[in-house]
Image (cartoon, rainbow, N blue to C red):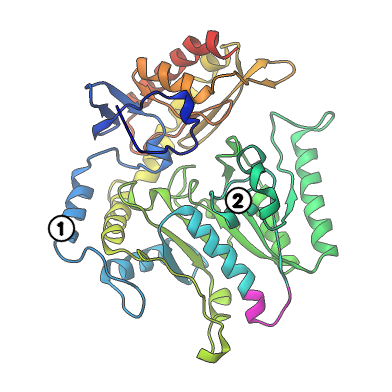
Amino acid sequence: MKSSVWHPNTQMKEWNSFDKITKAKGMWLVDSKGHKMIDAVASMWCNVWGHSNPQLVRTITNQSKKLQHSSMFNITNEPAEQLADSLIKMSPGMHKVFYSDNGSSAMEIAIKIALQYWKNIGEKKTEIATVENGYHGDTFGAMAVGYVPQFFGKFKKQLFQTLQFPVPNNYRLPKGYTLSDYQNECLEKIEKKFSKNNNIAAFVMESGAQVAGGVIIYPKGFQRKISQLCKKYDVLFVLDEIATGFGRLGSMTQYQEQKSIPDIVAYGKMLTGGYLTMAATLANKKVYDSFSGEFNDWKHLFHGHTYTGNPLAASVANENIDMYKKNNLIKKVQKTSKVFEKYYDEISEIDIVGDIRHKGMLMGIELVTDRKKKTPIHPKKSINKIFYEIGKKNGIYLRTLGNIVMLVPPLAISEKELNSLLTRTIKTIQDAKSQVI
C-alpha cells in the first residue's frame, strides 16, 4: 500500500508496508484483512476500557452536537471546568489545572512553571535536577529533563543542561552493592548536591517508575525521600504521572502511594480513557499564587495551545473519571494485576529472559544474550519489528522498547483476557529466540 505517512520511532527502511487497523472492540484490534490482535500496549499506554466503549463513544457524540471546540483564551467551557474540579479533588495538595494536548506539552508547561516561579518571587534559581534515563516526552524541554541517550543523543548540544542522578535498578546494581546500599548512595548524592547548590529550581522525575526508560520500578521509599529532600532544601518537586497515574501502577494518583506530594504534577494518556488527546499540569497554591500580580508585572504564564481545554476531550475525560468510580476500577486493577505473578516462573525459564519487572498493569521483560553477564540483546534487525511480526502471528500487538518486551494492557482487561495475553507473549518470546540471538 502506498502511503505518505512517516511513522514514529520507526526505521522506515525496515518496513515495506504497515498493517491498517480498520476497527477495534474491547481488547482487540482488527486489521483490513480481518486479522485480530490483543492490544497488549493499550494503544501506547493510554487505553483504559478497551476500544469502542459505548459510554465513552456516546459522550463524545453528545458533546459534539453542542460544542466541538472553544478557545480558553478569555472564555471557558463547562466540561473543562468540571474536569478541573475533579482533578483537584483527586490530587491532594494541588490547586489549579493548566490544560494541554499531550504529555510532552504537559511536562514542558511544568518545567516553565517551575522556572518562572523563582523569577516571580525574585529568586535566581535556574537549574533542573532529574534522574538518569528518565523520559518525559520528545519536545526539547522534555528531552532535556528526560534524556535517554539512545533516543536523543543527536540533539545533546541543543538541550539545556540538567543535573542527573542515578536510579537504583535491582537488576543492574554496581558490583558489591545491595539494593538498599545503592538506594542510600543515590539519595546521598542528591542531598550532597542540594546542600552545596542553591541554584536548583526543581527536581523532575516520573512518579513510581520509569516506563520508557526500561520499566524500572523505584524501591520503596526512594521517591518519598527525594520529596523530603526537596522540601528540606527548598527545591520544587515536579512529578510526571502521564504514564504511571490513573491506575497504571495500581493507584489513581501514584504520588499518594509513594507518600510524596509534589508542587507540580502532570497527567495525560489515560485521562480521557485513551479516546481523545488531552493532558493536564497541576500546581499547588504556593506555585500558582506566585503568578498573580498586576498586568504590567508580567508574572502571568505565557503558554497556551489552540486546543487547550477542548470540550470534547474534557467531556470524555469526565465520563472516564466517573466510570473509574462507578466500576471501582482501581480495586479491580489491583486484583487483576496479580495474574501477572502466576507467569513469573514460566517467563523466567525462557533462556533469553534476564529479568522481569512488574507493578500494577505494567510489565517489562528484559531480554539478554548472556544471563550471567546480563548482556542486552541487540540484533541487526530491530527487536520491535521482530516482535511485531511474530506477535501478530500469535494474535497479539506488541511494541518493544529496545531489549524490553513491554506489556501495558488496557486497565479494564479481564483476568481471562490477561491470561491469554501472557500465554501469547510467552509463545512470542519463544518463537522469536532464533531471530534475536
Q: Is residue 282 left or right of residue 186?
A: left
Compare residues 296 and 290 and report the one nearer the observer.
Answer: 296
Q: Which mark is residue 62?
A: 1
Classify mark 1: residues with Cα within 10 Å, few (<14), some (14-19) or many (20+).
some
- Measure how far apart labels 1 and 2 are at the Cα level: 38 Å
Quarter occupied by the C terminus: top right
Q: Is residue 115 left or right of residue 432?
A: right
Residue visible at 73% across and 60% down? 229
Q: Quadrant of residue 422?
A: top left
Which amino acid type is marked by label 1? Asn
Where 135 sits versus 13, above or below?
below
Q: Is residue 197 left or right of residue 92?
A: right
Where 54 sits versus 74, above or below?
above
Where 95 sits versus 322, above or below?
below
Describe the element under mark 1 as helix, strand or loop.
Answer: helix
Tag 2 or tag 1, which sits nearer the N-term?
A: 1
Which amino acid type is marked by label 2? Met
Compare residues 216 and 232 and report the one nearer the observer.
Answer: 216
Q: Which mark is residue 143?
A: 2
Q: Which mark is residue 131?
A: none
Q: Is residue 399 left or right of residue 63?
A: right
Q: Give the image location of residue 113, x and y in percent.
A: 57, 69
Q: Give the image location of residue 138, x and y in percent.
A: 54, 49
Q: Quadrant of residue 82?
A: bottom left
Q: Give the image location of residue 348, x and y in percent.
A: 57, 16
| Residue 289 on the magenta span | no
Where 216 sits versus 225, above or below?
above
| Residue 121 on the magenta span | yes
- In the image, which residues are magenta? 117-124
